[in-house]
Amino acid sequence: MKAVYKFKHDFGRYGKLKGIFVADDSEIENLIGKEIYFGEVLGKHSEVIVEIIPESIVCMEWADQDFVNKFEKLHLSCGYDPRRYMWRMPGGGPEDWVEV
């Protein structure tokens, strides 16, 4: 079932990554435990890699599927969507990165 999710990861004084997007439950379950490579999103040479934990992604709305469909149809997603970046399983080497 599709739902609206909020992604948030805080890096303290360096900044934070936030995003709101629509995804299936199975897509979110697939992300949990993976390391996501965001690149240099917090400045030059920042090389941001985040391990997705359940607290990083929160379901905002799922009960009202009409709302979820309108949210998706009107392209209201914004910010960082971890599904759009490269990922690997924790502990994997540089050769284990997978293009999403």
Image (cartoon, rainbow, N blue to C red):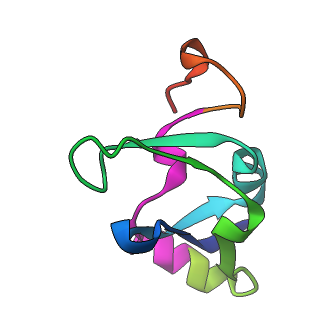
**Residue furthest front as drawn:** 13
**Residue 79 position within the rendered picture, expressed as x and y whole percent measured from the top left:** 37, 67
The residue located at (78%, 51%) in the rendering is 26
Task: Residue lying at the far top in this picture: please name it.
Answer: 95
Q: At which x and y percent is residue 27?
A: 70, 50
Q: Is 68 on the left or on the right of 17, as rendered?
A: right
Question: Seen in the image, is 52 located left or right of residue 15?
Answer: right
Q: Is residue 27 left or right of residue 39?
A: right
Q: Is residue 16 magenta?
A: no
Q: Look at the picture and state if 90 lies above or below 22.
A: above
* Quadrant of res 6: bottom right
- Residue 8, horizontal then vertical, whole percent: 54, 71
* Residue drawn at (33%, 46%) of the image: 46
Q: Quadrant of residue 34?
A: top right
In the depicted view, which residue is nearer to us: 19 or 94? 94
Residue 69, quarter of picture: bottom right
Q: Is residue 8 above or below residue 40?
A: below
Measured as percent of width and height from the top left, residue 61 is found at: 67, 83
Q: In the orientation shown, which residue stands out farthest toward the left? A: 44
What range is drawn magenta here? 69-87
Quick check: can you spot residue 74?
no
Q: Is residue 10 left or right of residue 40?
A: right
Residue drawn where x is 65% and y is 67% of the image? 57
Q: Looking at the image, can residue 38 be seen?
A: yes
Which of these two is toward me, 97 or 81? 97
Q: Residue at x 71, y 31 (%)?
A: 89
In the rendered image, the quadrant that contains the N terminus is bottom right
Viewer-nearest residue: 43 or 24: 43
Answer above or below: position of 51 versus 99: below
